[in-house]
Image (spheres, rainbow, N blue to C red):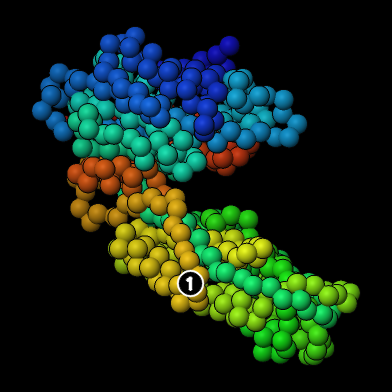
Amino acid sequence: MGVLRELEPKAVFRFFEEICNIPHGSGNVEKISDYLVSFARERGLYCRQDEMKNVIISKEAAPGYEKMEGIILQGHMDMVAVKKPECGIDMKKEPLKLKVEGDDICAEGTSLGGDDGIAIAYALAILDDDSLPHPHLDVVITVDEEVGMDGAKALDLSDVRGTRLLNLDSEDEGYFLAGCAGGASVRHILPVAWEEREGTLYTCKIGGLLGGHSGGEIHREKGNANALAGRLLQTVHTVTDAGICGLEGGLADNAISRECTLQLVVSEKEEELEQAVRTLEKVLQSELSTKDPGVKVEMIRGDAVRTRCVDSASEERIRKLLLIMPNGVQAMSADMPGLVQTSLNNGIMKLGEKEFTVITSVRSSVASEKEALITRISALTDTLGGSVNVTGEYPGWTYKKESALRELCVKVYEKMYGKKPVIQAIHAGLECGILLEKRPDLDCISLGPDMKDIHTTEEKLSISSAGRVFEYVCAVLAEK
Ligand SMILES: [Zn+2]
């Protein structure tokens, strides 16, 4: 017992180990939530657990801090529970097997949940220590952040007194986040009709692409196989009247599509078509020679077939949707150099029995730009006779040019580290956006200790960084 018991700060690592002993993957949070409630009850602290199992714990200001504006410490209690194929741990029922390797903590065969267990460990260590100076504290711990931020979406903040929110869900010491993107998933549906066609079956594949997360990697402008499929269909259309009998690409709306497959029935000009596709491959390889050098367009000739293909009106709708649909970065931020402000990603496309579906992930740190982009691509689909539905919408956090909390955090950082922190915004979602929508008066910042490879079995939490950042958070609380 107590793999972490020798580590400093002792209270932080004691609570972290207790948390790791309670299974708490997303969707399996009842036990960890109840643990937080018992922690608060044992210490006579105000505590509220809601139906979702979100937990809010409050503590009165330390003597001399009663008049200060309250601070909210915020994180999420769920973790991404993944394990190696050979690992025998039942992550729904059994504790993690913690290991210390040099300056890192990791878990044997599984993810660690430093994201975001360390936030809870910090909060509990602070609440547990009556000698620490701090203003009124609200500790807000949400559920299911990792699967759509559902806890934050359902959270009621009416009994939270603080207005300054420290979100402890970042993983780079010295990098403070001060903005994030909002987003939504937009499903475009085009009706299709079928007809019999005869000819040679061709299978075309666009592949060899790097892919990546559509929030973190979109600025690299890598090739998106689904977007490139529009170019391929146009090439085919220019050469011959082929029938489409299959079209599919991408695995997730928030992943840049690495591969797509198009199946064609070709009855004339086979050679010209093969030549035109080879030319398209060269063109794409030249366009992407630096950004995505492995791009390939394969064309495999199959047997003579008689099969169902979409009719020419459906073909035209599909081709035009893929050709015209914008994709990638739409706007960069003028306030935060290098930050993508607005983007979209054609993540998944599929030709089904009754319809052709494309799912795009739209992101923007400016709410009105997100709305405008959704309206624009909806108008496109509407023009082509299709329909659209929007799901999984979450609000962003627009970077504020003035933030008293950020100034305070920078001042304390400079005092402690002797240098300036880096202030950043990210082109992905954080719970701060959702909380700000409920409480626009909040002043937020997001920070945390160094972690590597979160959401994977290689996840590591730096012990020394966790110690420093804890000391730093206490120093921010102690400021008058
Ligand atoms: Zn997290």
Which residue in the protein does label 1 denote? 381
Give residue 38's quadrant in the image: top left
SS under mark 1: helix
Task: Specify few, some or many for label 1: CA neighbours under 10 Å numbering under 14, 14-19, or 20 or more.
Answer: many
Residue 318: percent from the left, percent from the top? 59, 74
**Residue drawn at (19%, 27%), measured in percent from left and top?**
135
* Residue 230 image-quadrant placement: bottom right
Q: Position of residue 15 (x, y in %)?
A: 45, 19
Identify which amino acid the numbered label 1 is placed on. Thr
**In which quadrant of the rendered view does residue 203 lie?**
bottom right
Q: Residue at x 48, y 66 (%)?
A: 387
Pick whichever, 132 or 322, lies toward us.
322
Left or right of 21 in this view: 50? left
Q: Classify the position of the C terminus by image quarter.
A: top left
Q: Can residue 284 be seen?
A: no
Q: Residue at x 62, y 64 (%)?
A: 354
**Residue 165 spot, x, y in % from top left:** 27, 38
Query: Residue at image x 65%, y 81%?
Result: 312
Q: Residue furthest right?
A: 303
Relative to 368, is 456 above or below? above
Disc 1: residue Cβ within 8 A of ligand 1's nearest atom = no
